[in-house]
Image: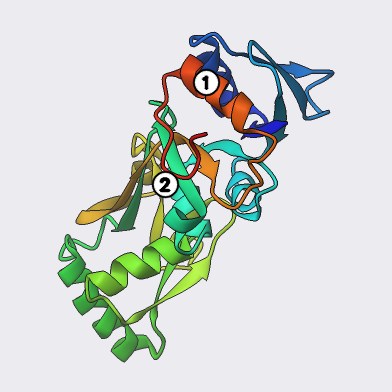
Amino acid sequence: MLKIGVPSKGRLMEKTFDWFGARGVTMRQTGNEREYSGAVDGVEGVELVLLSAGEIPRELAAGRIHLGVTGTDLVRDKLADWSKQVAELAPLGFGHADLILAVPACWIDVDTLDDLDAAAAAFRAAHGFRLRIATKYHRLVREFLTAQGVADYQLVDSQGATEGTVKNLTAEAIADITSSGETLRANHLKILSDGLILQSQAVLFASRPADWSGAREALGVLADRLGLALPEGLAA
């Protein structure tokens, strides 16, 4: 049985169902919306598993599901050496968002990462502790800032409304996902001109460590139906 993990609610679930449905594979939620159970019609031997988008990278890496739909940002942040654990099968063309670095709009002299690096050094000298950047995406932000030579900062965890941390004085800057920028502007924040960390969208991923012995036939049929080219190691 081939197990495919799909986001369990909201627009991501609806868009995923639409994407598969347009290719002749019908996904549907069974029971009520709190039961997180579903079914797949159109391909034999496929089981639908409804999970939060944030759980899907972990389940793929553990091999508990064979395929999964989740955001590029979540896979690359949650999985070290992500390309060794999952394979990208297809970008799905929805769920677009940018992971960006933003600072208070009133910081008129801070527009680039070089400016931020200088501001961080001045902040530490003035306050005795490092400039705080609130984020949910620790791995991606740390790797990006290291590559750009920014060092005098600390990441603080944010699992709520990250844009509000600056106003609440728990951080001086943020790194977060945005699609339109409206929430940033409403909280008087601006994106650094070179502060794009990652462009993300929903992607169909395959698990490399999963046991494919009983799922290859269903994978082949599903790949044909969806028009997918399977990477080496997954093809029958």
Give SS at disc 2: strand
Mark 2 vs mark 1: in front? 1
Q: Is residue 65 above or below residue 155?
A: above
Residue 112 in the figure: left or right of residue 84: left
In terms of image quadrants, where is residue 127? bottom left
Q: How many marks?
A: 2
Residue closer to the observer: 164 or 21:
21
Pointer 1 residue: 15
In what quadrant of the picture does the N terminus appear?
Answer: top right
Give the residue type at disc 1: Lys
Q: Is residue 149 left or right of residue 48?
A: left
Q: How far is the residue under mark 2 from the one under mark 1?
A: 19 Å
The quadrant in which residue 110 appears is bottom left
Q: In the rendered structure, which amino acid carries the disc numbered 2? A: Ile
Above or below for 48 versus 165:
above
- Mark identifier at residue 177: 2
Residue 136 appears in view? no
Percent coordinates x, y for residue 172 in the rendering: 39, 68
Q: Estimate how packed mark 2 is, as few (under 14), some (14 to 19) or many (20 or more) residues with alpha carbons within 10 Å.
A: many
- Looking at the image, which is closer to me, 141 or 7? 7
Residue density around tag 1, few if under 14, some if 14–19, many if 20 or more, within 10 Å: some
Q: Position of residue 219 (x, y in %)?
A: 57, 28
- Nearest to N terminus: mark 2 or mark 1: 1
For the point 79% across and 17% down, the residue is 30
Q: Position of residue 102 (x, y in %)?
A: 32, 56
From this view, report whether residue 38 is shown above or below residue 215.
above
